[in-house]
Image (cartoon, grey):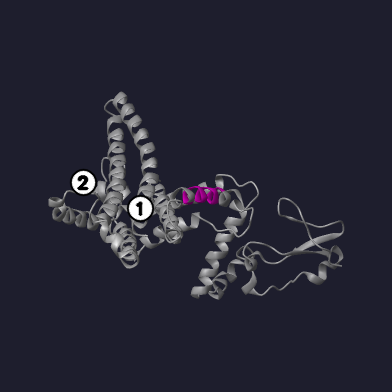
Amino acid sequence: MNENLFTSFITPVILGLPLVTLIVLFPSLLFPTSNRLVSNRFVTLQQWMLQLVSKQMMSIHNSKGQTWTLMLMSLILFIGSTNLLGLLPHSFTPTTQLSMNLGMAIPLWAGAVITGFRNKTKASLAHFLPQGTPTPLIPMLVIIETISLFIQPMALAVRLTANITAGHLLIHLIGGATLALMSISTTTALITFTILILLTILEFAVAMIQAYVFTLLVSLYLHNNT
Amino acid sequence: MNQPLQRSVGGEPVCSQGLRPLCSAERETLGVRECTCISDESDGLLEFCDVPLKEKKLLEVKLGELPSWILMRDFTPSGIAGAFQRGYYRYYNKYVNVKKGSIAGLSMVLAAYVFLNYCRSYKELKHERLRKYH
């Protein structure tokens, strides 16, 4: 039981070759491009969804911030599709690996912060001190704000990892419990099965919400810095 | 002799009376075939009896010729990439890039993905069978 629970989170390697590369690249197959004005249903649906999301997310930025649209849209598509594909049976979810999420969070956060420091130095530094703080509190508050700034990428990465990993683990556990209870007491097994169904619905929502939250926060950091 | 092609809604080439379509090999044109209508009477002139082995499709190769056919295939990186690209466009143009695509086009891909992942993790999964002795 101990070994079984975490084997689904091991990076897939086949004969020493990293299979994880193929798994990470797989969602790109599901987003075909089309140069036509009127394309097939699949591409049309994706274009509609992408337009909806980009309007909702990028409207708050000025023109400098809107140059990040491509990056943020690719980000939300990647995280959303990877999380949703991870809900299929037996599949591997790359976003459960902290290394991958750190690799996404740190460069994006650093890019936003460094843009802010280079272009609007005074305004970026001003973020370290909220408006209207009493004078004796200023040194402590600056320290706290600095810490909170440097914790942002860590929080981004760990939030995504923990949410997705926890969801997958719960599904494994409750699914195993349902199977084990089947021979002992059918009623309890049915209740557990209902819980499993509700949990799966929740996981679908979480998969998309986490992608949204990640991208939203990056966009917020960007907004503060452009 | 050659007339402009009429293509029916289903995508299959259709020619008028007395003519038959002659299409290019699907493999060369990324899943889209180019066809023209030729007169029926020129049957014997246009059929090749001896197609070179390299250009035969897999189902037309005789069993004895199979090893030499496999060895003649293009195994360079660009050849393999071309094979994947052709395969992708063949599936895409048949199931997704159609006027009324359905959920089946996506579902088949996801089902294949699930199956491949199952094969990948079979080694750990076989310990979870309901057997007395594993």
Q: Position of residue B54 (x, y in %)?
A: 62, 74
Q: Nearer the viewer, residue B74 or A53?
A: A53
Residue B115 placement, left or right of B91: left
A206 part of magenta stretch: no
Q: Nearer the viewer, residue B88 or A147?
A: A147
- Report the amino acid beneath label 1: Leu
Task: Give SS at disc 1.
Answer: helix
Residue A162's disc is none
Chain identifier of the residue bearing label 1 in the image: A
Regarding residue B131, the answer to whether it shows in the image is no
Q: Position of residue A81 (x, y in %)?
A: 43, 51
Magenta residues, as a range? A45-54
Residue A55 placement, left or right of A102: right
- Is residue A51 shown above or below B50? above
Q: Nearer the viewer, residue A144 or B33?
A: A144
What crowding class fits label 1: few (fewer than 14 Cα within 10 Å), some (14-19), or many (20 or more)?
Answer: some
Residue A220's disc is 1
Between circles 2 and 1, the one closer to the viewer is 1
A50 part of magenta stretch: yes
What crowding class fits label 2: few (fewer than 14 Cα within 10 Å), some (14-19), or many (20 or more)?
Answer: few
Q: Quadrant of residue A123?
A: bottom left
Q: Position of residue A215 (x, y in %)?
A: 38, 52
Instruction: For marks 2 and 1, give the CA distance.
Output: 40 Å
Q: Residue at x 85, y 56 (%)?
A: B16
Task: Give SS at disc 2.
Answer: helix
Residue indicated by mark 2: A2
Q: Residue at x 55, y 60 (%)?
A: B88
Q: Position of residue A62 (x, y in %)?
A: 44, 57
Residue B111 placement, left or right of A212: right
Q: Quadrant of the N terminus of chain B?
A: bottom right
- Report the amino acid beneath label 2: Asn
